[in-house]
């Protein structure tokens, strides 16, 4: 299970340190791609295969499915951390997540997300104000 929040800066070659706790569970190769809410996401190889199977099941005639798949898959990159646990983020992903320098790497249970520090701080500030409201609407799932 992925959990926790870690802040790391991109180096001059756009490399990001993946927290060691996450690297252990992610394995030696994983996939990073654009995700929802303005962040990036990391999937294990097995998760990535399962997601691809689900995407292939979407009919080609489904316009929203085509649009989502094009962006989601075209921005995906397979990564192998170097000996220091760093991965190089392509400029397209940096731009999509509006990463300037510092990233926030968070565990969200079954996957990892990478946020720009500014975006994460703004998002979490809004969520702090509505955390209890969200919990109330999810009561049946949180018992």
Image (cartoon, grey):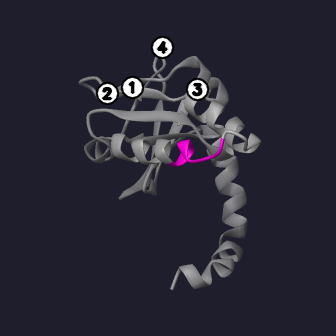
* Mark 3 burial class by Cα count in 10 Å: few <14, some 14-19, many 20+: few
Mark before the other along the chain sequence, 2 or 4 = 4
Q: Residue at x 67, y 46 (%)?
A: 37
- Gap between marks 1 and 4, in whole Å? 12 Å
Segment tinted magenta in the rendering? 54-59
Query: Could you say which quadrant of the image residue 87 lies in?
Result: top left
Q: Earlier in the sequence, mark 4 or mark 3?
A: 4
Labels 1 and 4: the sequence-earlier one: 4
Q: Nearer the viewer, mark 2 or mark 3?
A: 3
Query: Which residue is denoted by mark 1 in the rendering?
Result: 87
- Indicate which disc residue 81 carries: 2
Q: Is there CB contact under 8 Å for labels 2 and 1?
A: yes
Q: Which corner quadrant holds the N terminus?
A: bottom left
Q: Secondary structure at mark 4?
A: loop
* Residue linked to disc 4: 12
Q: Nearer the viewer, residue 51 or 119?
A: 51
Q: CA distance from mark 1 to mark 3?
A: 18 Å
């Amino acid at each position: 299970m992925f959990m926790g929040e870690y802040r790391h800066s991109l180096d001059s070659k756009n490399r990001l340190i993946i927290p060691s706790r996450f690297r252990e569970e992610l394995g030696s190769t994983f996939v990073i791609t654009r995700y929802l809410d303005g962040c990036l996401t990391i999937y294990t190889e097995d998760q990535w295969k399962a997601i691809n199977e689900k995407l292939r099941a979407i009919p080609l005639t489904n316009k929203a499915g085509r649009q989502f798949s094009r962006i989601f898959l075209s921005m995906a990159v397979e990564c192998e951390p170097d000996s220091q646990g760093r991965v190089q983020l392509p400029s397209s992903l940096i731009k999509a997540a509006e990463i300037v320098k510092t990233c926030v790497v968070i565990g969200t249970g079954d996957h990892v997300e990478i946020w720009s520090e500014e975006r994460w701080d703004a998002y979490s500030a809004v969520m702090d104000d509505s955390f209890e409201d969200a919990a109330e609407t999810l009561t049946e799932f949180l018992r």
